[in-house]
Amino acid sequence: MEFKAHPLSVDNLFSLRKQYYVSRNQREFSWVEEQLQEFWFDLLSNIKLIDDKFEHQEYFLGTIVLAGNEDGFRLSIVDGQQRLTIITILICAICQRLKELDNESIGKSFYDNYIEGVSIDEGDDNKDSDKYFKLDRQSDSDFFKLAIQFYNKTNENTNNLEDELLKQAFNYFYEKLTSIETIVEKFQIQPEKVDSQAIIKFIRAVAKQLTTKIKIIRVIVDNEDDAYVIFEILNARGMDLDSADLIKNKIFSDMRKSHPVDYAEKGWNKMINDFSDRNKNFKLTNYIRHWWSGHYAVVSEGSLYKSFKQKIIEGEINSESFLTKISNDASVYAKILDPRFDDWREQHAKQIYYSLLSLKIFNVSICRPFLLSLFEAFSCKKIRYNELSSTLKMIEKFHFLFNAIGSQRPSGVENTYSFAARRLLEAKSKHEARGVLLELKEKLINRVPSESTFVQKFKEIKYTKKKTTHRRLIQYIYATIERNIRGNDEVVPLDITLEHITPQATGLHYIGMVGNLLPLGSSGNLQAKTANFTKKVKIYNKSNFIYTKKFCEENKNVDTWDEEKINNKTEEIALLAYNTVWKI
């Protein structure tokens, strides 16, 4: 393997007539405020004001790996696009600030040197051809080019999470460049003495530090295969990239063909789009790890890439088939991750929606490898609809008892799900698939906490204005009890109003317990706010909730609602939950 490594400044890198483009194996821009703050702090901490003059110290930013001919015009960024992007964004913010501060000539010169170049036609020394951006981020969105890189910026809308992060980064630096607090600290002068000239002087000091004192090790490799190897070595310990990034690098390096269609990019982007539509902050590595656990074995995030690569080496999988499968399954996983009512509009599918939504409320993810296999088994007609629905309901009940209320340690449960997922995929008949479901059910039943433990934990969940952690869980409890009483899957809102029977204003330690809460419509809640218990019961009786009406009937002759009654009611609901509503 041959490569050339040189230490360079940003000036050395961007002042050349070259274009650096983000290669297709690269992840999206992902810097958040914490990383922006660290970069800004490092930049400023190496600028000192001594005798009214700025002095600059060098510091090392890291290594970038480029693929291509060193003497050529266009080089592919194999590793380092996050750093080159953030440098470009800060330079663009500097140019914009200088332009606004009536120092446009300096800003434009700075811009032409580092952001936008001009290709000179060798056949005519006086003829300019097309302009180009020195950093070319290939994307379906033009936001970065038009709203950040372009000198005469346009008011573009963001189109995805990456655009939002790029916008946040630009705005962060744009504000910092004229921060009175920072300038006062650097110049050690009074805020009222900060004028436009002081601001310009500060911005130019930042620009000099950025372009001449930051050092980068540039590694250029002629052979793109070697560039991918160096990329992997630099990131194999997970210092910069997570497992999904490394897997993407391997897939894209194996699937080079891009004509007539770049299937690698198309498949990977499909996954990104499936998840960003549901949860823009979701980590792709979590999905791939769950998929892997359901097909092979449970792996940690840190060992996922190693397991993937080992299967590639052994010839058990190949990049193309692997990408095809995880890309196709991503749409199902997205519905598991963030279920929506429109996904399951049919009357017979409402229970599926309720079960998936419940798991989201419980914040449970260890069952997802099995859920993927369960939906695939249904799609392949290994199991019937009623088996799909009843298994989901069983899993919902288990995690309510085990996690949401019981707070039990999950050790071993992930392996149980992984094993069942693989067996379900391997099942050759409906009979075998049914056996897998029954075996899983028995294993989960054995992990359910005891009645006494459940009741004790149930009494600990509370909801008040100051303690809102369990609000959605308690809303879920009453919505589920209500559906159980009605005996059907009628829509019961999960955002129901919870009425505190004994008012929160009393400040008593037991007012947040489930036994002091009732599901009630918002109008009823307002009417009952200051009434005594006898009057409240009459108001509660107007509720549409059958459970609330039953409560009124049971307590129509009761004068007060005290601690003893609240404790007894809480235990009564806990026993109803354990022995009836959520009994597996």
Image (cartoon, rainbow, N blue to C red):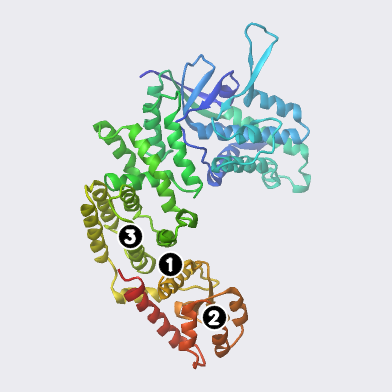
x, y percent for residue 188 = 70, 44
x, y percent for residue 240 = 43, 38
In the image, taking residue 522 as reference, residue 7 lies left or right, namely left
Instruction: Rate crowding at label 2 as few (under 14), some (14 to 19) or many (20 or more) other CA atoms within 10 Å.
Output: few
x, y percent for residue 280 = 51, 47
Q: SS of the residue at dot 3?
A: helix
Tell me the quarter of the picture where residue 110 sits: top right
Frontmost residue, 505 versus 255: 255
Frontmost residue, 385 versus 97: 385
Instruction: Rate crowding at label 3 as few (under 14), some (14 to 19) or many (20 or more) other CA atoms within 10 Å.
Output: few
Residue contact between numbered discs 3 and 1, judged by CB atoms under 8 Å: no
Q: SS of the residue at dot 1?
A: loop
- For disc 2, the marked residue is 507
Task: Please tell me which of labels 2 and 1 falls first in the chain.
Answer: 1
Instruction: Rate crowding at label 1 as few (under 14), some (14 to 19) or many (20 or more) other CA atoms within 10 Å.
Output: some
- Counting the numbered discs, the total is 3
x, y percent for residue 36 = 56, 42
In the image, taking residue 14 as reference, residue 107 lies left or right, namely right
Residue 475 showing in the rendered view: yes
- For disc 3, the marked residue is 386
Frontmost residue, 278 versus 516: 278
- Checking the image for residue 559, the label placed there is none
Tell me the quarter of the picture where residue 258 sits: top left
Kind of residue sitting beneath label 2:
Gly
Q: Seen from this angle, which residue lies furthest front?
A: 347
Task: Please tell me which of labels 3 and 1 falls first in the chain.
Answer: 3
User: Marks 3/1: CA distance?
Assistant: 14 Å
Kind of residue sitting beneath label 1:
Asp
Residue 54 showing in the rendered view: no
Give the position of the C terminus as an image quadrant. bottom left
- For disc 1, the marked residue is 489
User: Marks 2/3: CA distance?
Assistant: 47 Å
